[in-house]
Image (spheres, rainbow, N blue to C red):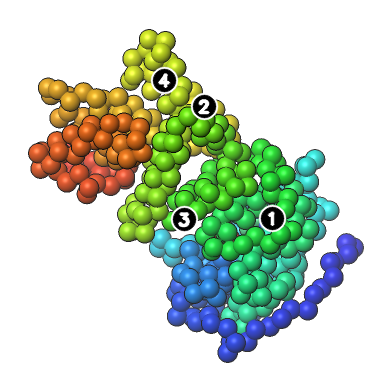
Amino acid sequence: MQEKPPITTPVIISRAEHGISRANISESALKVLYRLKKSGYQSHLVGGGVRDLLLGREPKDFDVATDATPEQVKACFGNARIIGRRFRLVHVRFGREIIEVATFRSMQFQQSEQSNEGMVLRDNEFGSIEEDALRRDFTVNALYYNISDFSVIDYSGGMADLEAGLLRLLGDPETRYREDPVRMLRAARFAAKLGFNIEAATEEPISRLGHLLAEVPSARLYEEVLKLFISGYAVSAFEKLRHYDLFSRLFPQTEEALSHEDHEFPLTLVLKGLENTDRRLAQGKPVTPAFLFAVLLWEPLRLVAEELQAGGMPFYQALQEAGGLVIGRQIQRVAIPRRFSTPMREIWTLQARFHNTKGKRPLRLLAHPRFRAAYDFLLLRAESGEVDPELASWWTRFQEEQGLDPSGGSHKPAARRRRRRKPRKKRSSA
Ligand code: ATP
Ligand code: MG
């Protein structure tokens, strides 16, 4: 038998002593919690949901933890699916909302695989709630809201850290970062999102261990990048990442290009672009990863294109060539799905076409499905001092003359917009 880690006595914060109200928990999450409880299982809300509720913030999603196995969870619901290889979880679906249900996991790695750097590749050992609490990342993410008596269970001093605004990793920080280097990105992200400080021992290894991110699959980093930059606090996340020298691990070409100190506009463009996404999200407007990546990779692309132009290549072609090159290098670190890299390249190459303001060409450009996003991108370039603001104003006026509202567009993928406008064509059966 394997030895179990020592069990700590939890602090139980009763219903009367904390501010979580069921009125702020989604109906779907409550349904899942109650159903599990009725079936005789332990049933808790856990993670960011509990943390955000205690902070009086609106949770992004609700995660549930239970002692029921994934199969047992699935059997409780008609609308459930077991997912995941590394961690097996159950997704319970209610329309657009998905409640993630995880079985308590242990921290015992004897039967899991670990890489040379100490990274956990697979851990699926079920455990007790205590063990589940201790294998989580930050103390403030390891609080459990128990649906059976509405109390909050705290195994790690998470409540005190929450009140102090501190991010503290459970266990030895270096070991925890080696197990999963993404925890460094999560530290920066939660610091940005919550405005918390990173506790000294948790903070110390980050600048030393950033290189471990090279071990993380590019698809997982893509997911993390979206969480960092498409969540309404992108500017702050960007600053934290740069502060801990993590941005360079995600976007090495951009960091390189930004470190040239001969101009200010590249950094201004990134900051304004991120401000823009934060603002759009605050206004409930859509934001596409294509625009975000176009912003983040513009300066490295522009530098390559400049060189190609110096060799005699026309601007449009230089943008195209440089785009391919820069994306090729970028996706070795952070994957970019083709459905976003394609429109991103269009946003870039259309920049060349804005210089043609004569004849029929402007009208044709206006009809381009990516015109909106490309125009917004031109505005960013103008605001940051990279192109003549007069060019951007020309295009603003031109749209107004054509009866369009230059500020009313969306960044939504054009294909979708087109589909909505056009009545369905009959398909020939050939
Ligand atoms: P968000 O507000 O972004 O949803 P979150 O804390 O809920 O924040 P999730 O990624 O949804 O973050 O993860 C849910 C919970 O799972 C976390 O609160 C934490 O307890 C645990 N967790 C997630 N990722 C890790 C990790 N890499 N290592 C350890 N525990 C993790
Ligand atoms: Mg969450």
Marks 4, 2: nearer the viewer: 4
Q: From the image, which quarter does the N terminus lie in?
A: bottom right
**Residue 152, label in figure:** none
Q: Amino acid at mark 1?
A: Glu
Label 1 CB-ligand 1 distance < 8 A: no
Who comes first in sequence, dot 4 or dot 1?
1
Q: Which tag, 1 or 2, sits closer to the chain's start? A: 1
**Label 1 Cα crowd, 10 Å radius (few <14 / some 14-19 / many 20+):** some
Horizontal side of residue 223 vs 65, given as left or right: left
Q: Residue 287: give x, y in percent of width and height.
A: 37, 48
Residue 328: which numbered mark, if any? 2
- Tell which circle, 4 or 2, labels the residue nearer the N-terminal end: 4
Decide: is 368 above or below 137: above
Measured in 3D between alpha carbons, the distance from the residue under mark 4 to the one under mark 1, in whole angstroms, is: 39 Å
Residue at (75, 56) in percent of width and height: 173
Give the structural element (helix, strand or loop) at label 1.
Answer: helix
**Dot label at residue 306:** 4
Q: Residues within 10 Å of mark 4 (few under 14, many from 20)?
A: some
Q: Which residue corresponds to mark 1?
A: 203
Query: Of discs 3 and 2, which sits in the foreground?
Result: 3
Label 4–label 3 contact, CB within 8 A: no
Q: Tag 3: residue type?
A: Tyr
Within 8 Å of ligand 1, the CB of disc 2?
Answer: no
Q: Residue sitting at 88 percent across and 64 percent down?
A: 3
Q: Amino acid at mark 4?
A: Glu
Where, by quadrant of the figure, is residue 152 drawn?
Answer: bottom right
Horizontal relation, residue 111 to residue 97: left or right = right
| Coordinates of residue 298 in the picture (x, y in percent) | 43, 32
Asked if labels 3 and 1 touch by Cβ distance under 8 angstroms, the answer is no
Residue topped by disc 3? 233
Dot 3 crowding, Cα within 10 Å, few <14, some 14–19, many 20+:
many
Give the Cα separation between the discs numbered 4 and 3.
32 Å
